[in-house]
Every structure is written in structure tokens, then in C-alpha cells.
Image (spheres, rainbow, N blue to C red):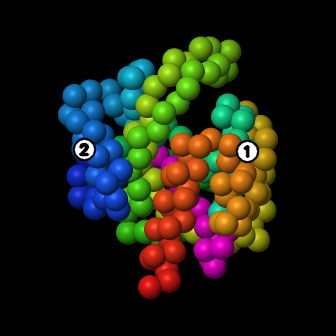
Amino acid sequence: MGWIEEIESYKPYNEQEKIDKEIILRCIEKFPDILTRDNQIAHITSSAFIVNKTKEKVLMIYHNIYDSWSWTGGHADGEEDLLAVATREAKEETGIKDIKLLSSGIFSLDILTVISHIKRGKYVAPHLHLSVSYLMEADDKQELFIKEDENSGVKWINTNEVNTYSNEPHMQKVYSKFIDKIYEMYNH
């Protein structure tokens, strides 16, 4: 299944995901460069929400640009295998070596706002990340390291404390949704 079909077949969890999915599919149809940052309005990103075996902790990084604890992830940059993008970014940003997919494909679809910022000395205008995310699991005993050009911290955070570490209100809603979904998946 191709990346577009994977998004098309995703079953939204709630109204937000239903609406975001419709908009993401419209953007894919409208913009041939949606997989690249050449599209300065909106582009596809892929992220991993990484939990430990007991689902009590989430692996997060202290993101330098957003000045907040956040999940791992990055731009597709032309890559159509969005799971590979999420996996690669998780490993690069945290140092973990072993990681496995928990959900059977996409875990969430979200449209995330990005405020203007400076990256590697260049101005980046406000834009949207059309976020495709995956639920993954890693051993919380693995050695972690900081990717200094992107983050200044990597650690496991208790799921009930994630939103006290994030200072981004729009991301706190996303993390709360993820934790609710995980709870429903593994406690029913």
C-alpha cells in the first residue's frame, strides 16, 4: 500500500482526525510537492510516539526550536515511506537502536501549526505540518543520546506528566489524545 492509500484507509479516532484527514487528502491532491519543504504552506511530516513496554512512559526530546519537550519526528523530504521516516527520526534524535511498531499502521493524523523561526541561520515562515504519526515501543533501558543540532535533552517521561513537560498548548492536546487512545487500546 502506498503512502496516500495508507492515509486514505486510516480510520479517524475523533472529529478532529476526521476533519484533519479530509484536509490532508485535499492538500495531497492540490500540491504535487506536499512531501517536500518546497511547499512552504504545508508539508508532510512523520513522527513516532514512543512508549515503553508497560505503556507508562513516553520517550521525548527537548526540541531546541520549539523550546519544549516533544515527540520525535521530522519532514518526509520526498520520502514516501512515512514509517521509515518516523523510525529513522526516532533513532537519530534519541540514540535508541531497537524500536518496534505497535499500531497496525498510522496511529494518528494531525495538522500542526508551526510558528516562524530561524533554522540553521535561515528564516522559516509560519506553515502547517501535515503530521502522520505512528505508535512505537522501545525498551526504556536502552542508552540514549542527544542530537545536539536538534535537541538538548532526551528522556523517558511518565505518561501522566507529559503535558507538564510540554509548554505547547496545541501539542498538549495531541499528547492527551495519544495517551487516551493508548489507554483504550491496552486497557479494554
Is label 2 or label 1 in front? Answer: 2
Count of numbered circles in the view: 2
Badge 2 vs badge 1, beta-carbon distance below 8 Å:
no
Estimate the x, y position of residue 103 in percent, counting from the top left. Answer: 43, 69
At label 1, counting other C-alpha atoms closer than 10 Å, the crowd grade (few under 14, some 14-19, many 20 or more) is many
Residue drawn at x 34%, y 59% is: 14
Residue drawn at x 47%, y 39% is: 112
Q: Is residue 84 above or below residue 24?
A: below
Residue holding disc 1: 62
Say which quarter of the image contains residue 49.
bottom right
Q: How far is mark 2 from mark 1, CA to CA?
A: 31 Å
Residue 99 visible to the viewer:
no
Q: Is residue 42 above or below residue 25?
A: above
Estimate the x, y position of residue 15 in percent, counting from the top left. Answer: 31, 54
- Give whichever of 159, 121 is nearer the camera: 159
Instruction: Identify the image quadrant of the N terminus.
Output: bottom left
Q: Earlier in the sequence, mark 2 or mark 1?
A: 2
The amino acid type found where label 2 is placed reads Glu
Q: Which residues are magenta?
A: 46-57
- Give whichever of 51, 165 is nearer the camera: 165
Residue holding disc 2: 22
Say which quarter of the image contains residue 26.
top left
Relative side of 44 to 158, left or right: left
Estimate the x, y position of residue 36 in percent, counting from the top left. Answer: 41, 29
